[in-house]
Image: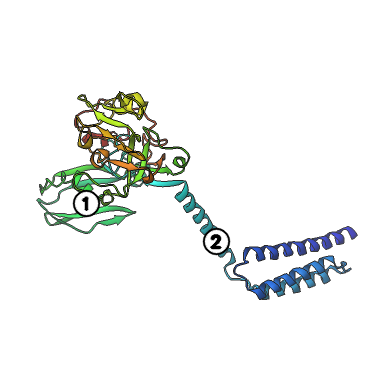
Amino acid sequence: MLRVFNFLKSKNKKEIRTFQKHIKNVLIRDDDILSLKQKENLDGIIGDLESLYRKPSPDNRNVLKAELSKIRSRYELVLPPKGLKILREYTEIFIVALTVAFGVRALFVQPFKIPTSSMQPTLFGIHYIKKNVVPDFPQPINFALYSTQRAKLKIERSGELEGAYPVETKFFFPWTPFNIGGIKYEMPGSPSKVAQYVFNNGSRKYFEAGETVCDGWLSQGDHLFVDRLSYHFSPPKRGDIVIFTTENIYNDASGEPLTDHGFYYVKRLVGMPGDMLKIDGNGLVKLKTAGTNRFRPITDFGKVFRKIFSKKGGYQGYWAVGRLMEGKTVKVPEGHYFMLGDNTSVSADGRYWGFVPRANIVGKPLFVFWPFSRRWGLPDSQPPINVPTTITESSIIPQMRLQ
């Protein structure tokens, strides 16, 4: 019996110490929001708890418990308990978690969506896919796996394209409504994207009743995480896929800023500071690095360029246009880089607007997390698909995304 009584006294002593520790933590945690009077009262309560702890234990343990209860009541007068305590605590945890997540995003890893087809077949932007290329699962599953939205249009009444409605948003993605023959339709994608796969870039105006204009899917493009950290410790390397901002970069022909077409671009780094580049009569890029006296084929500078010039699976090499027209030589200024898109036939890249300053470079792709296609995982790690690239590759590349 004596042993049980001593245990209960010890338990009360431990409770006093725990309460003391809690108040000290409150003083540290809320130092900037507690008033001077509150701090003085809490310091007094800590002193009273210390006295109570050192006071000889009474024979009746209820006496010690009663004195501790009085001190707790004083504490609640200084800091009255707030309602919905559990909800507030979980809300605070959630806010802290979000703050940490956004801090990590801003400093180290950033989600990024490939908007265009300029890096196909390495990375895919928003594109139309013909039916039977994507497995025909129910729509929610198809979208979750492959980022695809059903794009089927069958004309109910003959007529002309009469006009468009304001773009609608469904599950964060745009849909474009329009009229044909007095009937309203809507298709996934922005007006410019719908114009590509429905209206042949605006060339189609009249449609016949019963005609199936398209029967496929619109993919929302590759989504990936961007490594924003590595380039703070090591410089960009030739052959890297690079994400950069378009600030202070202008189109050669029109003079318009690239920011009018997008704040972020993604291209492959081909020219380093001090390099000289040209394209020969066979369409092969050659470069002379700083400090050397002869031009070498770009394929000598890494397997990624041998892949691009393989002429397989959609890779086309690089076409001689703009600043890299045949017979021209480009020299990359110090502190700048020369970028090209892998899908050279449709890529608005350094051939049309020049060089990217080092300060504009944000990072490089780290991991493709959606959709679950052949490209899921580490970017640029797959060999080309073993089929010949044809002269009309830009029109059939989208059909190969899951091969």
How many numbered markers are drawn? 2
For the N terminus, the image quarter is: bottom right
Residue 125 locus on image (x, y percent): 30, 42
Mark 2 and mark 1: Cα distance apart in space: 42 Å
Residue 266 locus on image (x, y percent): 33, 41
Indicate the secondary structure of the residue bearing disc 2.
helix
Q: Dot 1: few (<14), some (14–19), or many (≥20) neighbours within 10 Å?
A: some
Residue at 13% across / 46% down in the picture?
Answer: 210
The label number, if any, that marks residue 366 in the structure image = none
Q: Dot 2: few (<14), some (14–19), or many (≥20) neighbours within 10 Å?
A: few
Determine the image quadrant of residue 123: top left
Label 2–label 1 contact, CB within 8 A: no
Q: Is residue 164 left or right of residue 305?
A: left
Residue 25 locus on image (x, y percent): 67, 62
Q: Pick whichever, 251 or 204, lies toward us.
A: 251
Q: Pick whichever, 155 or 384, lies toward us.
A: 384
Residue at 88% across / 58% down in the picture?
Answer: 3
Examine the rendering and report whether any part of residue 202 can be seen.
yes
Q: Which residue is mark 2?
A: 92
Q: Pick whichever, 78 or 319, lies toward us.
A: 319
Indicate the secondary structure of the residue bearing disc 1.
helix
Amino acid type at image mark 2: Glu
Residue at 60% across / 67% down in the picture?
Answer: 32
Residue 331 locus on image (x, y percent): 29, 34
Q: Which residue is mark 1?
A: 191
Q: Is residue 6 left or right of residue 293?
A: right
Amino acid type at image mark 1: Pro
For the C terminus, the image quarter is: top left
